[in-house]
Image (tube, rainbow, N blue to C red):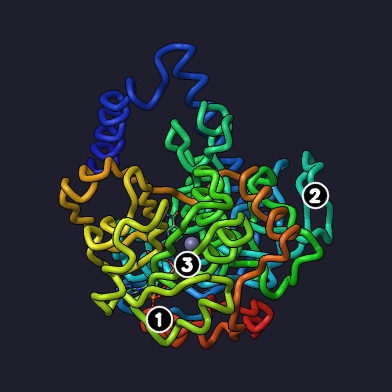
Amino acid sequence: MLKPFFCLRSVNIAIKLLYPSVIPANLAQIKLWIENIFVSKLWSIKKDNMIKSKGYAAKDSTSPLEYWEFERRELGANDVLIDILYSGICHSDIHQVHDEWGGTQYPIVPGHEIVGRISAVGSGVTKFKKGDLAGVGCMVASCGQCDNCKSDQQQFCSEKKTVWTYNSKDVMHDHSYTFGGYSNNIVADADFVLHVPESLDIKKVAPLLCAGITTYSPLKRWNISKGHKVGVLGLGGLGHMAVKIAVAMGAEVTMISHSPRKKEDAALLGAHKFLNTHEAEEIKEFSSYFDFIIDTVSAPHDYNLYLALLKTKGVYICVGIPAAPMQINGRSIMGGNKILTASSIGGIQETQDMLDFCAQHNILPETEMIDIDYVNEAYQRVLDSDVKYRFVIDMSTIEK
Ligand code: NAP
Ligand code: ZN
């Protein structure tokens, strides 16, 4: 009979003990309390407007990519919704799916070379309208206020608020993890969406959004032009774009490759010379030859060997990101006062400039179109250097 009484009494004591933390003590706390309730309510409302997506995801570092249905955040006032038409396969997708750089959040939907058509715009968007051709690269949001964001270097947002297209916490919106372009649609801040010139072949254009900008940006920054001797190390997705862009900028371009079978293709892409890295004699011939080398290799390799191919004050630009740390002998750069530098994708305005440059010079990647259910075989072929020179996924093939 006494049991209910004791129960009530212990609840009473518990409330009294918890009281200071449950009930806000001052006005500021009350405000925060109300805000928290309001925000959580808002999120629950937002959940009703979440956008349904179909994609291909990996659930851990060793599983293949497979069909997965998920939700994206609702369309905000400054956002656009894009129906994805084509998505390129970048080697960075493979590095991250396999967690080679560490920190991959699963399930992961890769893809940051995205082209599609705008299917809805937020109330504040003026840059796009429904039906426009649009592109998304490696970023979908950033703080927009810091010096780096304001100087078109959103990839280096000083507030650490760059939101990557996938495998990234969306700190500018709902703090969920982002999902990429191997899917039928995407929501992005309109400021991070590119106008894709209609004159470019829509089936080929997607790889420009990463491979294109990642090579254009350093080549432009270093003012590559007529009279420069440029070596491009690695003939893959980035490498073949580097060849085309450096040739269009007027440089003499040499393809430096560990795949002699690619010699003919290199010439077709516009390279003036070819250096087979298996041939010690050929390497000797190119000693102290280049003004610039852009290194696009995805696997560990000997940087010291290629630094020796630079002239005095030559510039070595790393864009490839092998999983293992670089091993460089200090003397490889000291002799000849060489410059060792790197480059990370490019800013949004710069990406727009690159698209316009490519439209002007009619530069497009060499692509092989695949259905989404071929994606795991495609990954293996990229690892085997067996693709000419970028896979593009026809995203209409995801419709079940
Ligand atoms: P990819 O298509 O696989 O091309 C990489 C090329 O590297 C291959 O075609 C091959 O060229 C060469 N290679 C591969 N394995 C090699 C080995 N064991 N030894 C020597 N050479 C080898 O890759 P991708 O998509 O162009 O990406 C290249 C790298 O850039 C990746 O690490 C990627 O993560 C990185 N990336 C960086 C940025 C950035 O912002 N910096 C942006 C995008 C991608 P050959 O057969 O001609 O030798
Ligand atoms: Zn990429």
270 vs 312, nearest the viewer: 312
Q: Which of marks 3 and 1 is nearer the N terminus?
A: 3
Is 51 located above or below residue 366 in the figure? above
Residue at the farthest front position: 285
What crowding class fits label 3: few (fewer than 14 Cα within 10 Å), some (14-19), or many (20 or more)? many
Q: How far apart are marks 3 and 2 (CA)?
A: 32 Å
Q: Nearer the viewer, mark 3 or mark 1?
A: 3
Residue at point 51% right, 56% down? 215
Q: Is residue 106 visible?
A: yes
Q: Which of marks 3 and 2 is nearer the N terminus?
A: 2
Residue at point 77% right, 59% down? 197
50 vs 165, nearest the viewer: 165
Q: Are discs 2 and 1 less than 8 Å apart at CB? A: no
Residue marked by disc 1: 385
Q: Where is residue 186 in the image (x, y as percent from the top left)?
A: 63, 60
Q: Is mark 3 within 8 Å of ligand 1?
A: yes
- Looking at the rendered image, the quarter that the C terminus falls into is bottom right
Q: Does the residue labelled 1 lie within 8 Å of ligand 1?
A: yes
Q: Position of residue 180 (x, y in %)?
A: 54, 63
Q: Does the residue labelled 2 lie within 8 Å of ligand 2?
A: no
Q: Which of marks 3 and 2 is in front?
A: 3
Is 127 located above or below residue 206 in the figure? above
Is 344 located above or below residue 29 in the figure? below
Residue marked by disc 3: 239
Residue marked by disc 2: 128
Q: Position of residue 101 (x, y in %)?
A: 30, 59
41 vs 352, nearest the viewer: 352
